[in-house]
Image (cartoon, rainbow, N blue to C red):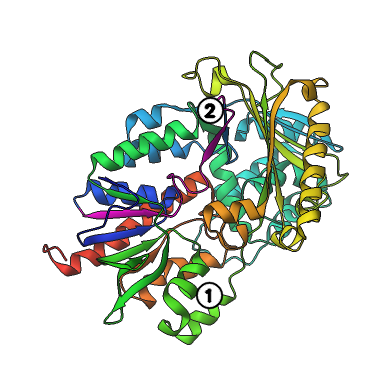
Amino acid sequence: MLLKVHEPITKNYDIIIIGSGLAGLTAANILGRNGHQVLLLESHNKLGGFATWFFRESRNHVFDVSLHGFPVGMIKTCRKYWSKEIADSIVQLKDVRMINPQFNIQTEFTREDFSKKLAEEFKIAPEVVTAFFDYLANMNFYDDSKMTNGELFEKFFPGRNDVTRFLMEPITYANGSTLDDPAITYGIVFSNFMSKGVYTFKGGTDLLISKMREELLKNNVDIKMQAKIEKIYLEDGKAAGVYVKDTLVKSKAVLSNANLLTTILTMVGEENFPADFVKQTKEVRLNSSSCQVYMGLKEGVRIPHIGDLIFTSNYPTYDPNRLLDLKVSSRTFSVYYPEETRPQVENGRVAIVSSTNCHWDDWANLNPEEYEAEKAFMVEETIKGLEKFIPEIRDHLEVVEAATPLTVKRYTNHLKGSSFGTKFEGLDVSMNLHKKLPGLFHAGSVGIIMSGWLGAANYGVIQVNQIESYLNTFGADNV
């Protein structure tokens, strides 16, 4: 049941889920389908978390906020935990381009194509390429490896910054990975992408989330939006509900799809956890945030096919720190051709979204005048960058809008506008939360591995198993 904003919640639940990112949505759907009484609470006026969209100009323009690419595994996850209809709408992006001073390459982003490019374009011996990919494929999440991404690339491609850029830069854009992060984070994520390429949802994020909402309601999940949770209710040392404004809603368990640090330190409070766990939590680093520039073209304007995803930079070498610089020299263009992306929309407009990674502090510390000036500079530089591919693009633009880390925080409540959750060490804290406070679970974008659309959805699946084991301790009776 979809509860209206001012409609009171009149019953208790088996599980309350805070936040409707893809982890929260997927967990809610499975739990509801398995017969549990589920309440899904979302602070925004739409579901999806960072997988979201917005309209402009009387709905003539629609913009997807997330970078539109995820691994082929999303098909299996959606078919198993959502519906065949959703899974069948996932299609491959076959034109991924990487353009920078070191190389200009078009790729299908598969192991076969990358192997060919490494051998032909970068002159890497085929046996080295095979050894590299086999090494990634055999990486085990539970191995206690101290190798960093930087050490991984130096092991196989010593002194080859261009090869590192080719293999690493798209992942840096996608989830904020750096050369200092554990190599296991790169191995698992990139192996997933490279198995069969990069995919997207045909029909747009708005259609995807609407179909997910239909599934949730069909599986008897109660949904209430514009319901921000400030506190999690504890009873006898266990999580036993939440406060929706001033109203206590009880449950047997709580799953937070909110920011990990906010969940532990604010929604619960550090006084309710062991001191060593609080210390471990406070040492978890947030991942980077994002800026976007949204560009909508005039009615009837069509552009040549310049690629689906274009990773472009004018910086001479690969440098993760430069990818986060306020005066950014690198950006990713996601091009939404209406006939391919939203064929269900009559007279759809071409949309282009530019994404860049950035630091929260660079934007949060600006005064209002500086903030607007930096946004204007970012928009202008983005259009100039796009003119390299479409010289006349400026005359075709009808809508141009920009978002910064402050925008991300405003609409998602992510601490410091983090687009990719936490660094790798956050995963251990998240997965062990229920062991420190019974009844409280967490799922979301943590540890890089659990970032992105597929990682978040699958983390929701993983946590369902833990939640159901906990719920079984209550027996068959409702709260």
**Tag 1: Cα neighbours inside 10 Å, few (<14), some, or many (≥20)?**
many
The kind of secondary structure the magenta stretch mainly shows is loop
Q: Amino acid at mark 2?
A: Arg
Q: Is residue 364 above or below residue 138?
A: below
- Closer to us: 321 or 392: 392
Residue under circle 1? Answer: 281
Q: Which residues are magenta?
A: 36-60
Q: Residue 296: where, in percent of width, then height?
A: 66, 27
Q: Amino acid at mark 1?
A: Thr
Q: Residue 412: where, in percent of width, then height?
A: 53, 53
Q: Residue 73: where, in percent of width, then height?
A: 46, 39
Q: Secondary structure at mark 1?
A: helix
Q: Is residue 193 magenta?
A: no
Asked which quadrant contains residue 181, the reply is bottom right
Residue at 87 percent of width and 37 percent of height = 101
The tag earlier along the polypeptide, 2 or 1, is 2
The answer to whether 210 appears left or right of 374 in the picture is left
**Tag 2: Cα neighbours inside 10 Å, few (<14), some, or many (≥20)?**
few
Asked which quadrant contains residue 61, the reply is top right
